[in-house]
Image (cartoon, rainbow, N blue to C red):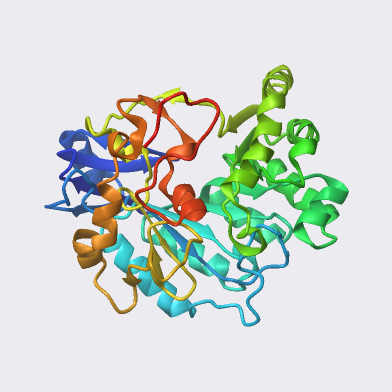
Amino acid sequence: MSTLARYEPLLKGYMIMEDGEFYLIDPKDIHEMTDSSDVRVIDLTEHPPETYAMPLKVQLQATERCNMRCITCAVYKNSSPEQLPFNQVCNILDKLSDFGVLNVQWSGGEPFARKDFPELVTYAASKGFKQNVYTNATMLTEEMISLSREHFFKMQISLDGTKELFEEITGVKLWNKFEKGLQSAISANIPDIVLATVLQEKNVAHMENVIRYASQSGAGKLRISMLVPIGRSRSVSWDRYSVTIDKFRHNWPRLKCISSDLGLDVDCFLEKQLCEDTVSGDIAKLISPGGHSFLYIDSKGFIYPFPFLTTAELRLGNIMADDLKEIWFKSEKLAELRNQTYENIGCGNCQLECSFVERSLVYAFTGRIDGPALLHAECTRKRR
């Protein structure tokens, strides 16, 4: 299995990805790696201002096909789910490899609903990508489990509720299949399994059940994130959603203690940490990876800065027809996105990583890339 490395002119050093993390490598070490193992080095020579020479990560929508009907998803409603032919996806992977992209993230729909998905993952591995996948776990056959153990450093599995609530939110009677798939993945020792919950009106009163189930399942990690208003949830305003967040905020200290007592590692959007920006002094990179280190390519090949926010306004081009480097360097939309800083969105010199400034969420709720951070109780700063 090959490994990709790249020379990153922004950092003036070589980069690789291992175990889900990016590392700078000493030039001497890179030469030793290329002499002793199957390492392919991509030499990039220029970069946009204060931005990586090319994206480090690209999320590929393997298919729009899905066996669930989740209320927070816009994909399932398509009467004719889209997916690019196998050869075209391989061509995309070839291009991304040549541009030094180190990480491919597979999403859907449900990626495992695609019959040739194992072949795509195997091909991506042959190109040197480190891979992870977003799945609902209900279609994990023995072949898929074996594939995942061999090629994925992380598997994120959706869990928005338990039992009856799970089936109400997903719109299908697949709880038993979910449990079987989750336990198969855990038993197979896939390196990093993360259960992922989207906070919403239907599950805000059931978060303790989700936390206890996550702990008992053996997954070890739970991610609680905010709703992105798409699909049947696109009419949810920030004022309305703030009520849901306030209910959760009231209970979070108690839920946090329960998680700690259970030994469950919970990544919750309410938690803020001091920024550790080792790339440069520009704190703007922590506002959003979209356009700085990340791109999204949908099942038709269209390129966007954020996953699932596939509006005409945000569309950057098509990977099959347009030059990705041209897009990365010259897109006016990406330039606008990169110009957003903590200071010019009203956060001043705040040094905290904060989910409420994430550009994709701000855009989804307000329609503005340059909008101020979403109002939240943890912030006392006066905003414009």
**Does 71 appear above or below 154?**
below
In the image, 298 versus 157, the foreground residue is 298
Residue 227, percent from left and from top: 60, 48
Q: Is residue 131 visible?
A: no
The image shows a total of numbered marks equal to: 0
Left or right placement of residue 59 versus residue 319 in this view: right
Q: Is residue 330 left or right of residue 180?
A: left
Q: Is residue 268 above or below residue 34?
A: above
Image location of residue 250, percent across then percent down: 69, 25
| For residue 155, side relative to residue 362 (left or right) | right
Residue found at x 57% / y 64% = 108
Residue 50: image quadrant is top left
Which residue does the image show at 22% across and 46% down from the upper left? 51
Q: Nearer the viewer, residue 85 or 341?
A: 341
> Which quadrant of the view contains residue 197?
top right
Whether residue 351 is visible, yes or no, is yes
Q: Residue at x 68, y 40 (%)?
A: 244
Locate residue 301 relative to residue 70 in the image: left or right: left
- Give the position of the N terminus as an image quadrant: bottom left
Relative image position of residue 367 (x, y in whole percent) = 45, 57
User: Which quadrant would residue 251 be assigned to in this image?
Assistant: top right
The residue most toward the left is: 45
State the residue in front, 318 or 60. 318
Using the image, determine if residue 76 lies above or below residue 296: below
Quarter of the figure that contains the C terminus:
top left
**Residue 54 on image: x %, y %:** 25, 54
Outermost residue toward the right?
164
